[in-house]
Image: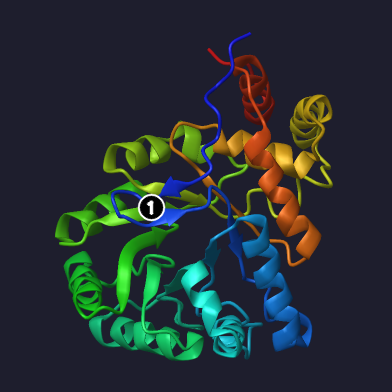
């Protein structure tokens, strides 16, 4: 059986000159459990030591419904301030545009202030990848584009992306941007395959957007499947995982990474060993038969 192409050791963010690891680490839970700067630094080092260079956070990470807005960025900033040499090893990604309880605000005034606030919290001069976290229906894409282009011109941002945007919303923002988008961040996992069938990944390939997959394990549901469909997906992943000597989690990452769009899974674990384990997915090789077996199980019905 013929094998799909091997997973590359590095990828490039869209048409930018920013090289990234084929897996990212996400910090949405970094500020939980009153984590100390030293403990947070241990996690950052675990990612970097494993070869993960793309670190993804957001200004809303740490918010618990009443307080904590900006806490993850602030904690990361303290880590970077304590070890200035780390910054040069990291491709730093963050997101903004959510303002609880509005919920979204990408007006020129707010978005400009949000970018500056993220820079201050993380104690950096530039964010490598800044993403609009969720689309503000009340913001004209031309207004949003102007703020983002100005931030790039000012050296505050190197590259631009979006998260949770629909395909028409991506097209609209892209139309008005001088500095074109390089990334899109939807939810993708072996349990959440809508992007594969509804055209989102096809659009990403057409526009040269790197897809960053949040919740690649289905919010943990893939590790403890309950429904018949979810158990069937887990069984197909387990079959391949056992054959290649990896865990189900690693197989799930590898399955996503085998897609020609160049999907970059964002590992959400805050466990150093689990973070490092994810890079084992680079050594996986998929046949079309095995890849489609997972896909068919996820669809819950045969392909036409």
Identify whether 51 is placed above or below 189. below
Q: Is residue 214 left or right of residue 242?
A: left
Q: Residue at x 79, y 37 (%)?
A: 246
- Residue in front for this viewpoint, 49 or 25: 49
Picture coordinates of residue 29, whole percent (x, y): 68, 73
Residue designated by label 1: 13
Residue 182 appears in view: yes
In this picture, residue 165 sits left or right of residue 24: left
As drawn, 170 above or below 35: above
Residue located 51% across and 74% down the image = 58
Query: Secondary structure under badge 1?
Result: loop
Does residue 204 lie above or below 144 as drawn?
above
Q: Nearer the viewer, residue 237 or 244?
A: 244
**On the picture, is 2 further left or further right than 273?**
left
Q: Nearer the viewer, residue 34 or 190?
A: 34
Residue 156: x, y in percent?
30, 79
Image quadrant where residue 243 sits:
top right
**Residue 64 falls in image quadrant:** bottom right
């Amino acid at each position: 059986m013929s094998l799909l192409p091997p997973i590359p050791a590095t990828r490039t963010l869209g048409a930018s000159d920013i090289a990234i690891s084929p897996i990212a680490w996400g910090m949405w839970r970094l500020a939980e459990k009153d984590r100390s700067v030293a403990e947070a630094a241990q996690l950052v080092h675990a990612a970097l030591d494993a070869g993960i260079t793309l670190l993804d956070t957001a200004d809303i990470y740490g918010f618990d419904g009443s307080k904590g807005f900006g806490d993850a960025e602030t904690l990361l900033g303290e880590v970077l301030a304590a070890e200035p040499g780390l910054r040069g090893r990291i491709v730093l990604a963050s997101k903004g545009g959510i303002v609880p309880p509005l919920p979204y605000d990408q007006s020129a005034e707010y978005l400009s202030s949000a970018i500056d606030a993220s820079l201050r919290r993380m104690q950096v001069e530039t964010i490598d990848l800044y993403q609009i976290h969720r689309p503000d229906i009340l913001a004209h894409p031309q207004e949003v584009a102007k703020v983002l282009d100005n931030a790039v011109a000012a050296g505050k941002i190197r590259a631009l992306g979006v998260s949770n945007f629909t395909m028409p919303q991506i097209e609209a923002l892209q139309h008005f941007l001088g500095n074109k988008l390089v990334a899109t961040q939807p939810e993708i996992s072996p349990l959440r395959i809508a992007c594969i069938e509804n055209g989102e990944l096809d659009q990403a390939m057409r526009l040269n957007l790197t897809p960053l997959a949040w919740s690649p394990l289905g919010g943990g549901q893939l590790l403890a499947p309950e429904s018949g469909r979810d158990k069937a997906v887990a069984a197909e992943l387990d079959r391949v995982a056992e054959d290649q000597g990896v865990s189900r989690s690693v197989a799930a990452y590898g399955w996503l990474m085998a897609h020609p769009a160049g999907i970059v899974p964002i590992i959400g674990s805050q466990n150093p060993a689990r973070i490092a384990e994810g890079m084992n997915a680079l050594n996986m090789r998929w046949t079309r038969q095995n890849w489609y077996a997972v896909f068919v199980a996820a669809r819950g019905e045969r392909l036409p």
